[in-house]
Amino acid sequence: MLARLLDKDVKNQYVTLRFEGDGPLGFLIAEGTVAGAARGYVSNPAPYDGTLDVGRAIGRGMLTVVRGTPPQGKPYTSQLTLNGGGVAQELTHYLMRSEQIASAVLLGVLNRRDGVASAGGIIIQSFPHASETAINAIEARIKEAPPLSTLIEKMPIEDVVAQVLHGLDYKQIDSSFDVPLEYRCTCNRERALAPLALFGQDELREMIAEGGSEVTCQFCGRKYAFSADELLTLTAKQDG
């Protein structure tokens, strides 16, 4: 959702969220692109206490938000303190502090015994000319609306938005901005090889003596095997 707030006419834009809290989940990484691709990683996906809510599971620490448009320029990075209030509250705080836009972030996840049954979210932002009356009306409606987790199981997200904003004369202006959401990992052999180039000569020679090395993508789990000859190329580059 944050990636879709970027300029939709510029390709390859992405937003990366990194939650580093003191909760049992460890650190979390979520990445989304303006084209609707998403991927994520949790260092400890199965905490010992399954009754924890998300806020306590992440804990207090630091949230890093990276916005990028490869290959143009350097990515823009923001950081703020995590207060243990949950993802929606932390992102609302980020949008207000870093983007300086009054926003409301609503997130919902419906869990079943066999996993996540449905998940979704809504971001509502005010225009600079929005009146206090309009803002107050939306805030009141958000408080009155049913939990998002109970709605996203029953209806498409467009209908969920209409339900949350019921009575506020909401209508979808342009459906051409809709994009399908999909899990897509951007890993490849070139990116998997890059971290090995950071090892010193002695460590690389040890890998070569063992016949090569293997790198596993932390997002999708795909494994990339590199031969001794490929690692020799890395040592030659370092020698150069």
Image: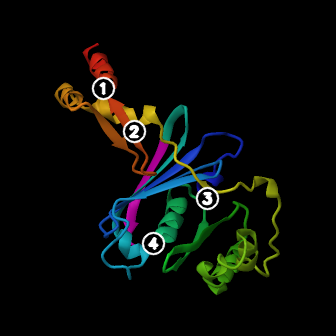
Is the residue marked by circle 3 packed among few (<14), some (14-19), or many (20+) residues within 10 Å? Answer: some
Cα distance between the residues tagged 2 and 4: 35 Å
* Quadrant of the rendering where the C terminus is positioned: top left
Cα distance between the residues tagged 2 and 1: 13 Å
What residue did someone put label 1 on? 231
Residue at 79%, 81% (x, y): give it. Answer: 167
Residue 233 is left or right of residue 67, and the answer is left
Amino acid type at mark 2:
Tyr
> Does 146 appear in magenta?
no
Cα distance between the residues tagged 2 and 3: 31 Å
Residue at 32%, 20% (x, y): give it. Answer: 233
Tag 3, which secondary structure? loop
What residue did someone put label 3 on? 1
Q: Choose between 234 and 178: the one closer to the eye.
A: 234
* Quadrant of the rendering where the N terminus is positioned: bottom right
Residue 86 numbered mark, or none? 4
Residue 71 percent across, percent down from the top left: 55, 32
